[in-house]
Image (cartoon, grey):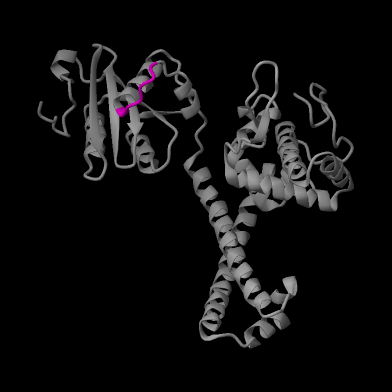
Amino acid sequence: MPTPHPGRLWLLDDHRLGRKESDMMIGVDYHPSFQQMAFLIEETGEYGERELKHSDGEAERFYRDLHQRGIRVRVGMEATGYSRWFERLLAQLGFELWIGDPAEIEAKRVKKRKTDREDARLLLRLMREERFPRIWVPSPENRDLRQLVWHRHRLVQMRTRIMNQLQALAMNEGKQWKSKLWSERGRTELEKLALAPWASRRRQELLELLDRMDPNIEELTTAAQQEAKKRPEVLRLMTHPGVGPLTALAYVLIIGTPDRFHCGKQIGTYVGLIPSEASSGGKQRLGHISRQGNSLLRYLLVEAAQAAARINPTWRRRYIHLAMRRHKSIAKVAMGRRLGVRLYWMWRNGCDYSPSLEFGSYVGQLGNGHGGK
């Protein structure tokens, strides 16, 4: 069967429809290089399937042709990466886009058969039956600000690796200076060390990389702090001990709105700070944390919880109690989860940090800043 022309809609005949405008639902199994689609014209019940390539512009021409024909389109696809251009195209054309939870979509699969065509059919069927598990989608501005936080975080990680390598060079020469290495005197002593030719070149290039990265990180840190000052909810979260502008800004950007969650426990699940479970036969089996959700926010919450334990006596007592009962690593994760829940209630109830109600169950009590509204 010959491949349909990209500029024409397969199985769509405007004369047979009797009018120019029509409604179409499209289930899209998206891949970086192509998309497999299954579409349905609601007025006539006509159904079709098609594969569209991305690199040669076939997919873009297809959707622009639908727009020129005046066809109202609703597209459903799983949450996936490398699809920003496609989302922008649909928004530009005024088409409705539904993005679904991949885990829930997989749970609704009946047949033990997974192909691109079956995936597209499943998405279309869920849209028709009004069982499509839609998820919250951040705005373009939100996504761009996330790039700021992510970029700074990655640069800090790269700087840490460079500093660790320089520490290793010094320790191999019997110089264990630790944090003193980064002082002006420590830097001078490091540069004076007599090293072999290749080790000397490594030291020189690592120091040059470090000097170039510090101003960039400082610039990004300043930009993040300025963005934090523009948002009242971020400033409110910063009143909690251990929570700085980067953690508060990342929390607001990634959570989006507290109305997405019915209770604070869902925050721990969303971020992936709850233990995985494989219980059966009346026996509970808990494993490592699920690590689902955003890894950056999970990291920042655990780091901020450790900072809170260092400067706040109540958090320090709670951390030491958990560490003595279990283990330090478990205590750190537990405190990070608790901090995520605490920030949720502060944001949802619109209240600043209060040391009067630190730990305990206050769900359902109004006006205390930690219970439900």
Residue numbers of the magenta segment: 111-116
Question: What x and y, as percent, mark residue 154?
Answer: 55, 57
Confirm whether residue 355 shows in the render. Answer: yes
Confirm whether residue 101 shows in the render. Answer: no
- 44 sits left or right of 337 in the view: left
What residue do we see at 85% from left, 37% from top?
358
Residue 209, quarter of the rendered image: bottom right
**Direction left: furthest residue:** 2
Q: Is residue 315 above or below residue 162?
A: above
Query: In the rendered picture of this protein, how many numbered marks are placed on residues?
Result: 0
Residue 269, quarter of the rendered image: top right
Residue 115 sits inside the magenta stretch: yes
Q: Main secondary structure of the magenta part?
A: loop
* Quarter of the figure that contains the N terminus: top left
Q: Is residue 139 above or below residue 311?
A: above
Question: What x and y, as percent, mark residue 264?
Answer: 71, 29
What residue do we see at 57% from left, 79% from top?
203
Front residue (pair 6, 2)? 2
Front residue (pair 204, 267)? 204
Residue 159 sits inside the magenta stretch: no
Q: Is residue 137 above or below residue 214?
A: above
What residue do we see at 66% from left, 77% from top?
170
* Quarter of the figure that contains the C terminus: top right
Question: What x and y, as percent, mark residue 144?
Answer: 50, 48
Question: What x and y, as percent, mark residue 277?
Answer: 64, 27
- 32 sits left or right of 137 in the view: left
- 354 sits left or right of 182 in the view: right
Front residue (pair 75, 153)? 153
